[in-house]
Image (tube, rainbow, N blue to C red):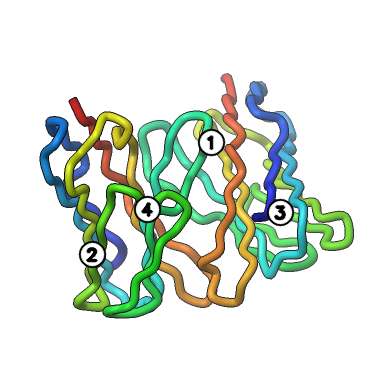
Amino acid sequence: DAGITQSPRYKITETGRQVTLMCHQTWSHSYMFWYRQDLGHGLRLIYYSAAADITDKGEVPDGYVVSRSKTENFPLTLESATRSQTSVYFCASSSGGVYTFGSGTRLTVV
Amino acid sequence: KNEVEQSPQNLTAQEGEFITINCSYSVGISALHWLQQHPGGGIVSLFMLSSGKKKHGRLIATINIQEKHSSLHITASHPRDSAVYICAVSLGNSGYELNFGKGTSLLVTP
């Protein structure tokens, strides 16, 4: 099906481990984004990408790394997970200012 | 940064009631978005608007650019409308500068 696919849906990892969240879109939207959603903060931008090989920091980028070697994929890596990174992560793409969101990944760092 | 305020924070209504959720923002925008998030679910874009009014089924969104205010109305509310409704504003033509409100949690009881 067309759309944005995030994987995994749920992940539990230990403090200090590296973990990668995957995001794949079936369109060719130029813009892709990673957000985290936390109670009391709403959605906050971690990183975004305007095109393949072009990425930039958002509001809360510390502790995260992204890459975009292909237009359709935008993985988010937590290099050394911390408990403060326990959150729900949403990937999104945008075309013409209209956003489409993935189903989210619920990450728990223990 | 554009401050986005939503009201009310929480709302309980009986099935069939007319519902209004409000959103105000602090600076000029290129577009305003209304998003819906069901419990434990993903985020769905309901409307993107830059002026006037849009309608989709029982949902109506309006925006007053001069007053920096938007409303989301739900007519003949139904329990399946229970969700968090999120207002977000975009500043640039690319749409990547989305600032989100903290959401309005709506519960519609039978």
SS at mark 1?
Answer: strand
Query: Residue A36: x, y in percent?
Result: 39, 45
Under circle 3, the secondary element is strand
> Are circles 3 and 4 on residues that touch, CB within 8 Å?
no
* Chain letter of disc 3 in the image: B
Mark carried by residue A24: 2
Identify the residue at image location x=27%, y=43%.
Answer: A105
Residues under labels 3 and 4: Cα distance?
33 Å
Q: Do the residues labelled 1 and 2 touch (CB within 8 Å)?
A: no
The chain carrying label 1 is B
Pointer 1 local density, CA inside 10 Å: few below 14, some 14–19, many at least 20: many
Residue at 20 percent across and 37 percent down: it is A10
x and y percent of residue B82 in the render? 53, 31
- Give the mark count: 4
Residue linked to disc 4: A61
Q: How crowded is mark 4: few (under 14 residues within 10 Å), some or many (20 or more)?
A: some
The Cα atoms of the two marked residues, 2 and 4, are separated by 20 Å
Q: What amino acid type should be assigned to the residue bearing mark 4?
A: Pro
Q: In this view, does A109 lie above or below B100?
A: above
Q: Can residue A98 be seen in this view?
A: yes
Residue B55's label in the rendered image is: none
Q: Select label 4 or label 1 by which is in front.
A: 4
What residue is at 65 percent from the left and 28 percent from the top?
Answer: B9
Task: Give the side of residue B83 with respect to residue A80, left or right.
Answer: right
Direction from residue B61 to residue A42 in the image, left or right: left
Q: Nearer the viewer, mark 1 or mark 3?
A: 1
Whether B48 is drawn above or below B25: the answer is: below
